[in-house]
Amino acid sequence: MKKLISISMNLKKIEALKSLNSECLVIGIYEDKNLNEITKILNSDSSGLLKKLLTRKELTGALKNQLYLPDMTGFKANKVFLVGLGKKNKELNEDEFSQLSSTISKITISSNAKDVDIFLPEIKVKLKKPSWVYKILSRDLESGCYQYFFEGKKTQPKNKLKKINFLNLAGNESKAKILSSIKMGHVIGAGMNTSKDLANTPANICTPSHLAKQAKLISKTFPSIKTKVLGEKEMKKLGMDCLLSVGNGSAQESKFIIMQYSGGKKTSKPHIIVGKGITFDTGGISIKPSPNMDEMKYDMSGSASVFGTMRAIAEIKPKLNIIGVVASAENMPSSTATKPGDVVNTLSGQTVEILNTDAEGRLVLCDALTYIERFKPASVIDIATLTGACVVALGHQATGLLSNDQNLADNILESGYSSCDKAWQLPLWDEYQSDINSKYADIANIGGRAGTITAACFLSRFTRSYKWAHLDIAGTAYGGRVGKTSSGRPVPLLTEYLLSRKQ
Ligand code: BES
Ligand code: MN
Ligand code: ZN
């Protein structure tokens, strides 16, 4: 396990900032044409520098406005960064704060300092307490520090940041409450980084067996998680033919992984998260075009988010029963690969006509979703980079959400907002179901025009006995503004959802 940065709180008055022997100091400034209580003090401590900068409009305090002062007059700190918080009495919405928080995280990390002190006066967010603000901040700081260690690359990125210290306690909550939120955000950030590490690992290393090994490793580090791994022989015996059909063309053995965290009463039903773990998706015989096919190493991002969430859960230790499941295979073309038109059995007993071998995610998930019926789940969420259509519909901003239970969907939408890791619901109406009728089997694995919805329709045929939601993370798990790199989403959403369960 990688070492986390340390985040602490060591209270100081603003008047004391000038004499702090800090490697790097980040100070939040409100937007104000006149000097306010903060800029007044900073101005006199810097012999009028702040006023000059404000007059010249180099510093405005507008949301996310930033200024770097390598040697701030009158201040002992080596580097000072001023960051705009917007107008003092204007409440921010979650989106605005989320952007501010990642700006603060970026400034802190790009400072190249080992040790950073942060002074932030109160940031008001609509309907949120200060502890929420600190939770998101510390999560973004930990997650922002993430760097992938490229094994085969000579020049390794070096992130120096080791220690962050909050200098003030803004708002009316106790220090203990704030510290526990900081800890919470911190481990969620660490969970995101676990997820990113797995997803960024090239597919020649990150195989289904590699995922199985990582699951056992998580169990070793966190004994509260018990791991079980099924190989192809065991799955064949159970009748998971549909999952197995995806790996038919691959030399890599398919794996089914079950990670059980039992923090609740024996009688309390578990919440289950199920991840798509296609470690590489060539499309199979329905092969994908070459450009950007490298991105298909991210096709196990759903399972990566299960690992990251389980790690965060193991550190937070809620009084809940939670199970993380991963359905993993490699989708390759070969003489033994599944062919378009093949009909396979599923664990549920329903048959599937595989019209397109590139619609493989649903094929591994359906058997996983049937397998978990034995746990009598309180709720089930599957997470999958399932359809390109979802990226067209929602871009890289929101995760697609479809569910057979509106109450569950509402809870997930809410968790998305409050973790700044948003989802947006698409319909799962009956009228879409006929799009996946098949001439030769009970269900076809593709059909219709609404790709994201029909994919969920397919899964819905296997989830009738419990409350279920599907998250399509094809757009949010990687790419977009972050480039070809994993985002760690939707670990924040999943963790938030699970922690808000009563039992
Ligand atoms: N893994 C892909 C979906 C995907 C596409 C994720 C682009 C991220 C970016 C999935 O297995 C797939 O190939 N889906 C097909 C389904 C189609 C054949 C019905 C798709 O979206 O094109
Ligand atoms: Mn595919
Ligand atoms: Zn896929």
Image: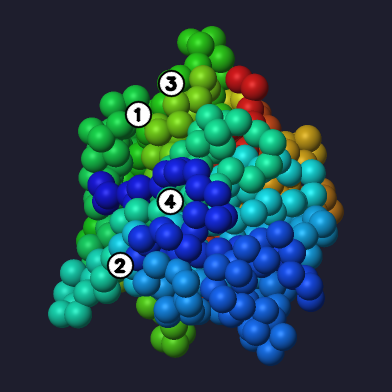
Q: Amino acid at mark 1?
A: Ile
Residue identifier under label 1: 225
How far, Cα to Cα, is label 1 from label 4?
A: 32 Å
Front-most of residues 113 and 496 = 113
In the displayed structure, 35 sits above or below 349; it is below
Sequence order check: which comes first, mark 2 or mark 3? 2
Front-most of residues 262 and 356 = 262
Identify the residue at horizontal 26%, vertical 71% (top origin). Answer: 158
How far, Cα to Cα, is label 2 from label 4?
A: 17 Å
How far, Cα to Cα, is label 3 from label 4?
A: 34 Å
Q: Is the CB atom of the residue marked by disc 2 within 8 angstroms of ligand 1's nearest atom?
A: no
Residue identifier under label 3: 262
Residue identifier under label 4: 165
Q: Amino acid at mark 2?
A: Asn
Sequence order check: which comes first, mark 2 or mark 4? 2
Sequence order check: which comes first, mark 1 or mark 4? 4
Identify the residue at horizontal 45%, vertical 31% (top origin). Answer: 316
Q: Secondary structure at mark 4?
A: strand
Q: Amino acid at mark 3?
A: Ser
Q: Position of residue 324 (x, y in %)?
A: 45, 37
The colour scheme used here is: rainbow
Crowdedness near tag 4: few (<14), some (14–19) or many (≥20) residues, C-alpha within 10 Å: some
Crowdedness near tag 3: few (<14), some (14–19) or many (≥20) residues, C-alpha within 10 Å: many
Q: Is residue 351 visible?
A: no
Image side of residue 90 versus residue 50, left or right: right
Q: Position of residue 467 (x, y in %)?
A: 68, 32
Image side of residue 338 versus residue 464, left or right: left
